[in-house]
Amino acid sequence: MIDAHTSSTQTQRHDVHPLSMLIITFTYIFVVASFHSYAFIEMMPLSLYPITMIVFYRLSVRHIKNVLLASLPFIIVIGGSQLFFINERISFLHWHIEAGWLALATLVVKNTLAILAATVLLLTTPIEQLAGALLSLRIPRFLVVQLLLTYRYIFLFLEEAKRLRQAYMLRAPHHRAIQLSVWGSLVGHLLLRTFERAERVYEAMTLRRFSIQRMHIKIKRWTMKEMIYTYVTVMLFIVYRLVVI
Amino acid sequence: MIHVSNIYYSYSDGHEAIRNISFSVQDGECIGIIGANGAGKSTLLKLLVGLYTPQSGCIVIDNMRMSKQTLRHIRRIVGFTFQQADDQLFMPTVYDDVAFALRNDDMNENEVKQQVTNALKTVGAVHLADRPPYRLSEGEKRLVTLATVLAMEPKILLMDEPTAALDPKARRTLIHLVQSLPHTKIVTTHDLDFVFECCERTIVLANGTIVYDGPTEDVLTNEPFLREHHLELPLMLQGRK
């Protein structure tokens, strides 16, 4: 799980402008997604960006591994369909292989790179600063506030889910996982409990004069140095994409 | 300061939580509201701060009758701390949490800093300013929730079970703090010793109605009455057996 505290302390160590991080990450994901279905080898150099960031920011590999593992089943299910729809064979390096398998592997790499970039963004930039960056990009305020509240709701949801799971496991020590028959009841309870908790948090916010229009979101100044850094990085990605077709 | 007249409140499932309650609170009073679980204590506090709207009756605070139009003004002078501190703390750092209401008022950052520091100083939590709220101990969270409210400079403080889940030292710190605050205070609690030490007047609720409203000492020494309403003598008044 991405920890907001981890995120804020890491940012205190290396202060990168949130707008730079946002633009670079979105360009990176766009470039990764734009490669064709068999660009397995061509995309490999792009892994340098997230790896460099992880090393530079000394991010927790365990956190990132968990996020990647959570996304893997979805992408394998989606990518697995390629095996049924693509029936041709293509040459890859010195071998002739099923194109479906190469498409699946490429999709997994695309997913991995995109998730890595997004995770790096969230781990290095606090959500409040990202909200400020979105506002400076003229994203409507109500959407940005929605994003902030949704982000907080995710943590409430995970916290309640953890408590429910612990309560279940303590009363069913011989079960390795939650049994299918109680999932309906557990999920129902989870939703009702998180709704109630979210409502109480919202009440606390309204008592302290919260409103979408007045919510304080700090927008940091974008310096020339940061602009140049962003421009150079974005251009590197775009040039690489245009050169490697 | 506060006048409550004949209010009724039922939840959507039909449960009548508050039935025909009336009382007044004078400026500077500290009132303890006690009663069994489900007596309507928390509901009454939420009615006083406009989180719930009574089905009938009226609430007047600082000469303003509570309505949609006056709610914003009323919430400026009434500070409310929740039963669960975690519900009230939602920003990344303690500083941001205490500053939340002030920034919503478009106050400039220098003034925000001044008021946040004052509020944290009052509760003795300046050293927690940069900590994330969810990493604090329960006692520290209580102090910070009080600071979030004090930063708004309210005239009235409503506290819902402020000593719940506190260790003896944190509880004692909170008692000293509550005693030192000059505000008009209404506190709901099961901690009868807290009421005995901090509140000169006590209201006892049972099944949504007031069954006692008067001096704290008179009610908290009346053992048969307390037992009848699922309460007991404060620990400090119980003789060793």
Image (cartoon, grey):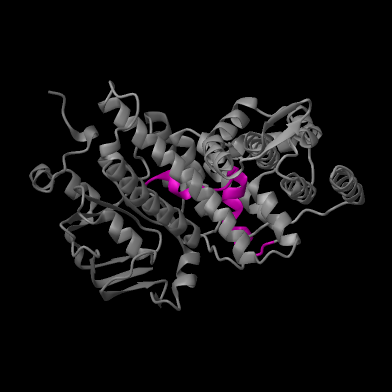
Measured along the vertical axis of the image, is residue A108 above or below residue B90? above
By secondary structure, the bulk of the magenta-drawn segment is best described as helix
Count of picture labels:
0
Which of the 4 image quadrants contains residue A139? bottom right
Q: Residue at x 58, y 36 (%)?
A: A3
Q: Residue at x 57, y 40 (%)?
A: A75
Q: Is residue B84 visible?
A: yes
Measured along the vertical axis of the image, is residue B24 above or below residue A21? below
- Of B189 and A132, which appears nearest the observer? A132
Q: Is residue B146 visible?
A: no
- Of A19 and A15, which appears nearest the observer? A19
The answer to whether residue B173 is left or right of residue B215 is right
Q: Residue B85 magenta-drawn?
A: yes
- Of B224 and A77, which appears nearest the observer? A77
Q: Position of residue B237 (x, y in %)?
A: 20, 35
Q: Position of residue A100 (x, y in %)?
A: 62, 38
Which of the 4 image quadrants contains residue A170? top left
In the rendered image, the quadrant that contains the N terminus of chain B is bottom left
The answer to whether residue B22 is left or right of residue B65 is left
Q: Residue at x 81, y 33 (%)?
A: A45
- Magenta segment boundaries in residue numbering: B83-107
Q: Position of residue B123 (x, y in %)?
A: 52, 42
Q: Residue A23 magenta-drawn?
A: no
Q: Position of residue B204 (x, y in %)?
A: 20, 54
Measured along the vertical axis of the image, is residue B222 above or below residue B156? above
